[in-house]
Amino acid sequence: MHDTYYKSLLIVFITLGFIIALSYLLYTLYRRRKLEKISQLPFPKEYETVLQDIPLYKKLTSEEKEKIRHSILRFVNTKKIIGVSLELNDEIKVVIAFHACLILLHLDISECYENLSTVVVYPNTVIANRVSNNGGIYTKGEFLLEGQSSSDTVVLSWSDAKKDAYHLHSNNVIIHEFAHELDFLDGVADGTPPLPYSKYHEWAQVLSHEFNKLQEVRLKNRDWGKYRLIGEYAATNEAEFFAVVSERYFENPEGLKKHFRELYDELEDFYKAHQK
């Protein structure tokens, strides 16, 4: 009686395992064929017209431009981009895809944000509610949301994203949110993206040092000095610090290199965007 029951149970588990393996194989084949078709698509002239107005695109070499065009096509055709009270057009899709792909351009990552499925775009900054805890005292208030990310969804304000995309200063909300997505790739947003094991100690040492110094400056709220370049929001936590300094690395590399050479070197060793 028991032998028959266990044999039946074993058959069920084997069958389920076979179904799961077969489903995964079919999905893998489907995805591979889809990516092959995407790689053969011509790059639309409308997309190229949008790119020509983006300052960070103009800084790329010919080889980098060719590579990122393929990445943009892959991003646009594999991610669901949704407009909320906003009609999507080529400009919105290309601007977002370009900056998202820019930070992956020199990374050894086979998947294009494999956990990310959806990008939600609002026309303007979103007013959201937030509960904060200060010494056990909880307060609820409204704040302006330019962007937000989880492991599978990125939310962006198009008015803020567009402003940042066409004017180099220090901020870029698209780079910020996709730096979070990059951080998520190892399973947790902690300010440390996927790194070779040999790099973790030095990365943690340099970024933790500057993060702790920034927190000290924020608490004293005086003599910000060079830390004005990074800003107060980066002191929120390690994940926000990584996202903010990633913005500075791409938007204002000269300033970051001048004032935070060790921090710049760590980001350069990771992103490799300025090694021409």
Image: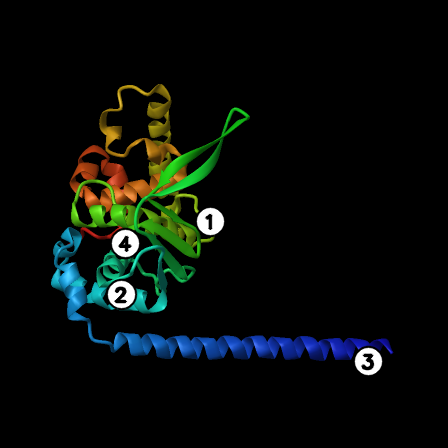
Q: Which residue is mark 2?
A: 71
Q: Residue at x 27, y 75 (%)?
A: 39
What kind of residue is marked 3? Thr
For the residues labelled 2 and 1, the Cα–Cα distance comes to: 25 Å
Q: Alpha-carbon distance for marks 4 and 1?
A: 19 Å
Q: CA distance from mark 3 to mark 1?
A: 44 Å
Q: Please state the horizontal and vertical placement of residue 68, each as a whole percent of the image.
A: 22, 63
> In the figure, residue 240 lies in which quadrant?
top left
Question: Which secondary structure lies at badge 2?
Answer: helix
Q: Is label 3 in contact with label 4 (beta carbons under 8 Å)? A: no
> Which of the 4 image quadrants contains residue 235?
top left
Cα–Cα gap, marks 2 and 4: 11 Å
Determine the secondary structure under disc 1: loop
Q: Position of residue 91 (x, y in %)?
A: 21, 60
Asked if the residues shown at circle 3 and circle 1 are in contact, with their CB atoms under 8 angstroms apart, the answer is no
Answer whether residue 117 is visible to the viewer in this image: yes
